[in-house]
Amino acid sequence: MKKYLIPWLLFLSALQAISQVIPDQSMMMARSPATFKALFKTSEGDFTIEVIREWSPVAADRLYQLLLTGFYNNCALFRVQPEYVVQFGIGDRKDVNYFWDKRPIPDEPVMTKNLKGTLSYARDGLNSRTAQLFINMKDNHKLDTINYNGLRGFPPVGRVIDGFEVTSSFFSEYGFEPANHQDSVMMYGNKYLKRIFPHLDYIIEAMIISE
C-alpha cells in the first residue's frame, strides 16, 4: 500500500500547485517589478508575455498578484475572434472568481496603443477591471480611444513576445457567444463551459518565469 501512496501524494501536490487559491492580504499588496515575463501553457501550446509596468502600473500589479496565486490556471479562452481579440480570465472556482470580482482596480489612462499582440484588461464601466484580459489579434486602434460606458479606451499592460502563432490557433468557431454566458461561468466554472462549448481551448498553467 505504501508504494502507491507516495505517487498519489505527489500527484495531489502537483495538482494543488497549479490550482487557483484565494490570496491572503499580504499577497494583495504585492507590487510588480518594472517588467516581468510569464509563460502560459495552453491546450494548443505555449506563449510568453512581457508585462511593462509603466504602461499601466495598477494593472501590472494586479496581473502580478493573479499570476502568483495561480488564477489563470485552468482558465478557458472563452472569446476567440481571430481578427479581433482572444479573451480569458474567468476561473474554475466560484469563490475565487467572486473574491477578485469584489476587488476591482482603479482606471488608468491609455499610455500605449492596442497593437497586435498587446494585452489589455477588459472593463465595462468605471473602475471595473478585475481579472479578465484580452490579446489584440491585430492592430485595434479604435480600442485606444473608444468611449465605452463613460471610459476612454483600454490601457495595454503587456505584450506577447513569443508564441503568438499559438494564440492564433485557439478554437474560434464559437466566436463571441461564450462571452454571453459569463455569469454562469463565474458561478459554475469549467463544467458549464465544457457542457455548452466543449471545444474551447484552455490555459493549463500560467506562471512568472523572470523578473
Image: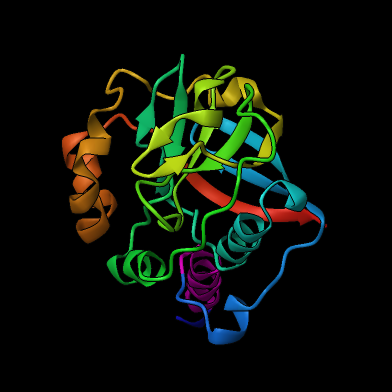
Colouring scheme applied when the structure was drawn: rainbow
Q: Is residue 48 visible?
A: no
Quarter of the picture containing the N terminus is bottom left
Q: Residue at x 66, y 56 (%)?
A: 60
Q: Residue at x 43, y 70 (%)?
A: 103
* Position in image of residue 17 (x %, y %): 56, 68
The quarter holding residue 129 reads bottom left
Up-down: is 69 above or below 156?
Answer: below
Does 14 appear in magenta?
A: yes
Q: Which residues are magenta?
A: 3-20
Task: Out of 75 and 1, give the one closest to the viewer.
Answer: 75
Q: Is residue 118 left or right of residue 140?
A: right
* Position in image of residue 32 (x %, y %): 73, 63
Q: Is residue 95 left or right of residue 34?
A: left
* Position in image of residue 62 (x %, y %): 58, 62
Quarter of the picture containing the C terminus is bottom right
Q: Residue at x 37, y 72 (%)?
A: 99
